[in-house]
């Protein structure tokens, strides 16, 4: 399954359709070109993680009813591509999380 993913993290090119996943852990690790320390969620169903931005964190806090990452482990969420995400005033699309139906 790892061969299906060209990146160790979800991005707009890895999310082809909505995917329901279960959070297995959230860890802090160095990511990106600037080697910044960021929180990353990993899932039972796929071998890649999701770097948690402010929007992702707010969604997880709401769904877990807690800001403690330990309370987020075991949550089922849907990873999806939102084409309306903007950056710098331009619509670029982005990976988002939401409750499963």
Image: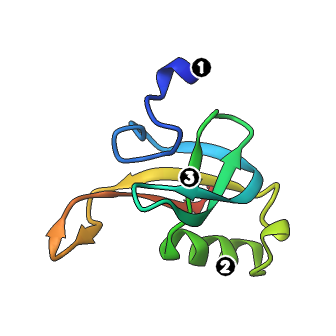
Q: Residue at x 68, y 77 (%)?
A: 61
Say which element carries label 2: helix
Q: Position of residue 52 (x, y in %)?
A: 56, 64
Q: Which residue is mark 1?
A: 1
Closest to the observer, 99 or 27:
27
* Count of numbered tags: 3
Asked which secondary structure carries label 1, the reply is loop
Relative side of 23 to 13, left or right: right
SS category of the residue bearing label 3: strand
Identify the image quadrant of residue 86.
Answer: bottom left
The residue to which callout 2 is attached is 62
Near mark 1 (Cα within 10 A), the count class, few <14, some 14-19 or many ≥20, is few
Crowding at mark 2 (Cα within 10 Å: few <14, some 14-19, many 20+) = some
* Residue marked by disc 3: 50
Where residue 67 sits: x, y (%)? 74, 81
Which of the two discs, 3 and 1, labels the residue nearer the N terminus? Answer: 1
Q: Position of residue 74 (x, y in %)?
A: 82, 54
The residue depicted at 59 percent of the width and 66 percent of the height is 37
In terms of depth relative to the viewer, which is nearer, 101 or 24? Answer: 24
Determine whether label 2 and label 3 are within 8 Å by CB.
Answer: no
Distance of label 2 from label 3 (alpha carbons): 17 Å
């Amino acid at each position: 399954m790892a061969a299906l993913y060209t990146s160790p993290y979800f991005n707009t090119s890895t999310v082809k359709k909505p995917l329901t996943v279960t959070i297995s852990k959230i860890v802090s690790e160095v990511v990106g070109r600037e080697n910044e320390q960021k929180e990353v969620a990993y899932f039972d169903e796929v071998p890649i993680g999701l770097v948690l931005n402010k929007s992702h964190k707010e969604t997880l806090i709401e769904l877990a009813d807690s800001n403690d990452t330990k309370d987020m482990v075991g949550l089922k969420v849907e990873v999806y591509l939102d084409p309306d995400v903007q950056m710098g005033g331009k619509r670029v699309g982005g990976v988002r999380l939401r409750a499963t139906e």
